[in-house]
């Protein structure tokens, strides 16, 4: 699935490192996104041959990108969201080729440029990841 313009205009990530391709619903402090996996993604070839599963770190990245989409609609100034803390990541199931990820992110609190989130990723009715994370909105990525 080709990502919508709303996604491409809000966050800087691009294929092959874009892990959100659809916004299903957006509320004031919540967002529900999807990622449609084709099975042709490079990470499936090496993780693990003959028994492919999506790496957990990429599941976390999908949650972070959902949070970035929510942040992008909550702030007036330009900047980039940088993950500063990850808490309680709990992996509950595997993600396989051709699965559709339902990524639900909730903004719990915003203090100045800090955004506190919780997220859940599901495949059909099975939870695959629960996580809490914090992002900071910065004007420029340090070192760039």
Image (cartoon, helix red, strand yellow):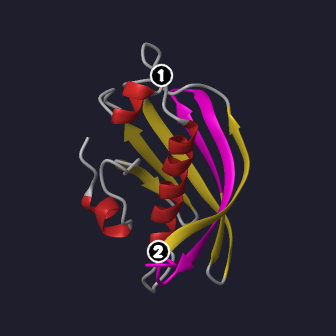
| Quadrant in the picture for the N terminus | top left
Q: Which residues are magenta?
A: 118-144
Q: Residue at x 36, y 66 (%)?
A: 12
Which of the 4 image quadrants contains residue 129?
Answer: top right
**Which numbered disc flags the more N-terminal residue, 2 or 1?**
1
Q: Residue at x 30, y 62 (%)?
A: 8
| Magenta highlight on residue 45 | no
> 30 or 58: nearer the eye?
58
User: Which residue, given by chain and number where applicable, does mark 1 sit on?
Assistant: 48
Q: Secondary structure at mark 2?
A: strand
Q: Is disc 1 surrounded by few (<14), some (14 to 19) or many (20+) residues within 10 Å?
A: few
Look at the image and tell me whether residue 73 can be seen: no
**Residue 41: x and y, percent?**
33, 34
16 shown above or below 100:
below
**Residue 88: x and y, percent?**
75, 47
> 53 or 125: nearer the eye?
53
Q: Residue at x 32, y 47 (%)?
A: 16
Observer-side mark, 2 or 1, equals: 1
| Quadrant in the picture for the C terminus | bottom left
User: Which residue, given by chain and number where applicable, does mark 2 sit on?
Assistant: 80
Q: Secondary structure at mark 1?
A: loop
Q: Is disc 2 surrounded by few (<14), some (14 to 19) or many (20+) residues within 10 Å?
A: some
Q: What separation in Å lies between label 2 and label 1 (alpha carbons)?
A: 33 Å
130 shown above or below 71:
above
53 shown above or below 26:
above
């Amino acid at each position: 699935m080709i990502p919508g313009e709303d996604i491409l205009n809000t966050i800087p990530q691009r294929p092959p490192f874009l892990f959100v391709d659809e916004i299903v619903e957006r509320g004031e402090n919540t967002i529900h996104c999807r990622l449609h996996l084709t099975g042709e993604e490079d990470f499936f070839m090496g993780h693990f041959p003959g028994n492919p599963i999506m790496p957990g770190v990429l599941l976390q990245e999908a949650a972070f990108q959902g949070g970035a989409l929510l942040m992008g609609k909550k702030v007036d100034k330009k900047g980039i969201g940088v993950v500063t803390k990850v808490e309680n990541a709990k992996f509950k199931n595997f993600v396989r080729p051709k699965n559709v990820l339902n990524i639900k992110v909730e903004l719990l609190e915003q203090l100045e440029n800090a955004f506190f989130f919780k997220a859940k990723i599901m495949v059909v009715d099975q939870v695959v990841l629960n996580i809490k994370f914090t992002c900071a909105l910065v004007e420029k990525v340090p070192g760039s």
